Amino acid sequence: GGRRSQPAWLLARPALVSVVANKKVEAGLARSLLYELVQPGQQPLALAGARAAVVFTSAASLVTAVRSGALPAGAAAVLYDPEAWPYTPAGEQGDPVAATARAAAAAHAAGLQLIAAPGLDLTTVLAPGRTAPRSQLFLELGLAAAIAAHADVLDLQAQSMERDTAGYASFVTAAARQARREHPGVGLVAGLSTNPPGGAVRSGQLVAAIRATSRVVDGYWLNIPGPGDRCPGCQQAQPDVGIAALAAVL
């Protein structure tokens, strides 16, 4: 992952649909390395020349889908998103590194990239009873390094910190350094959200987070979540915030 002048972008299919409505954003994304994140069983739309990556919250189901050929034709990658939530099996939450290794082995055997996106809340399972911030525990537990050892791309889920540019940059920089020490060639992306926990964000806050870390990571996963099972606390989706941030940096 030598730092590209043009960052890579990861966007879920509905987010990609909403942002390419803006022609400047569509043109900018078409010049970038772009991954369209789809759910199992969804067909990618390949907007703006995106490569498809299929998202799994369970390594077991990822391995099964890859081995049975149940991915869309032309998929470039699979993404493993283990978090402390009901969608990731408890055994995988307790040993996300071994689960990532299994996912990577299956992906690589099928000629696919593995993107790993471990949630910071895994620290509640791995270091129960500790009161330090999750980002600090994530670093102390060496999770960025241990998971990067198996992944082609590591997503640092820093979006909960994006209102605090210095805090966001500090965590992303430390985690990136840890990951690259273990796996010098790993691709690194940092998480951003138009709807992070704790209330509204402005596009300027996303732009500040990008500018503070663009020399440290290779790209960004821009989440544009709406209310639903996976985000029970989410307010209405805010694609305009994402479009404005992308338009400012592309």
Image (tube, grey):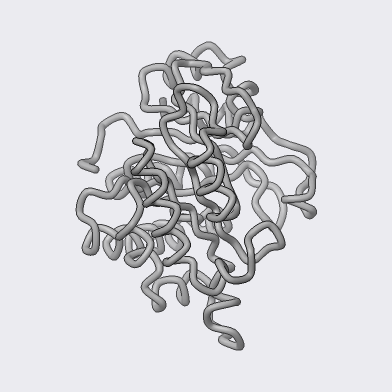
Question: Which image quadrant is residue 211 in?
Answer: top left
In this orientation, which residue lies closer to the viewer: 115 or 156? 115
Residue 179 image point, x, y percent: 30, 60
- Is residue 237 placed above or below 42 in the rendered structure? below
- Is residue 149 placed above or below 6 in the rendered structure? below
- Farthest bottom residue in view: 129
- Is residue 205 placed above or below 122 in the rendered structure? above
- Farthest front residue in view: 68
Question: Which image quadrant is residue 84 in?
Answer: bottom right
**Image quadrant containing the C terminus:** top left
Residue found at x 24% / y 63%: 182
Residue found at x 44% / y 33%: 9
Residue found at x 62% / y 21%: 17
- Is residue 52 placed above or below 192 in the rendered structure? above
Task: Tally the numbered discs.
Answer: 0
Residue 130 image point, x, y percent: 56, 86
Residue 151 image point, x, y percent: 35, 52
Q: Is residue 135 left or right of residue 39?
A: left
**Image quadrant containing the N terminus:** top left
Question: Which image quadrant is residue 176 in?
Answer: bottom left
In this orientation, which residue lies closer to the viewer: 130 or 194? 130
Residue found at x 53% / y 78%: 126
Q: Is residue 3 left or right of residue 121?
A: left
Residue 236 image point, x, y percent: 79, 39
In this orientation, which residue lies closer to the viewer: 68 or 124? 68
